[in-house]
């Protein structure tokens, strides 16, 4: 499998406009560069329904989030383990998540 490359500095900077609902963050272990978006839903049931749809997207993209859920709140952090930071796969999954949010 070809090594997945980290975004270049200019590609990373472009995320500010490309993914306006997302912020720069770190992975839970604090090691890797990441992006995150936080969601608030009506209740747990709505939050979990969203998570189920994101789970299917993750499988389709073969790219999986680091995420938390507390009742009606979901926080999604995206980074690429294999690249040790942000890659095009994070952009693609974030855009797909934005379409269902
Ligand atoms: N998800 N976030 C993330 N980062 C990865 O590197 C990654 C993944 N899901 C699946 C996956 N890699 C596999 O394709 C590789 O481990 C083979």
Image: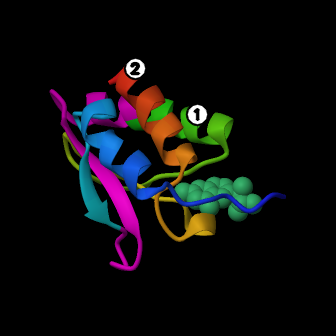
The residue depicted at 74 percent of the width and 62 percent of the height is: 3
Residue span colored magenta = 27-50
Q: To which residue does mark 2 refer?
A: 99
Q: Quadrant of residue 47?
A: top left
Residue situated in front as seen by the camera: 81 or 50: 81
How far across and how far down the image is residue 44, in percent?
A: 24, 37
- Residue visible at 54% across and 60% down in the picture: 6
Residue position for label 1: 56
Quadrant for ligand 1?
A: bottom right
Task: Using the image, determine if residue 30 lies above or below residue 74.
Answer: below
Question: Residue 56: which quarter of the image?
Answer: top right
Residue occupying image coordinates x 64% and y 38% = 61
| Residue 55 place in picture, x, y as percent | 53, 40
User: How far from the left and from the top, in percent, is residue 67?
Assistant: 37, 55
Distance from the alpha carbon under mark 1 to that under mark 2: 14 Å
**Left or right of 93 in this view: 12:** left
């Amino acid at each position: 499998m070809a090594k997945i490359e980290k975004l270049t500095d200019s590609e990373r900077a472009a995320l500010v406009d490309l993914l306006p609902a997302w912020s720069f963050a770190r992975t839970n272990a604090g090691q890797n560069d990441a992006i995150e978006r936080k969601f608030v839903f009506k209740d747990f049931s709505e939050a979990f329904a969203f998570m189920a749809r994101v789970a299917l997207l993750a499988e389709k993209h073969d790219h999986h989030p680091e995420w938390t859920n507390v009742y009606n709140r979901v926080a999604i952090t995206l980074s690429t383990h294999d690249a040790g930071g942000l890659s095009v796969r994070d952009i693609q999954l974030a855009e797909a998540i934005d379409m269902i949010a």
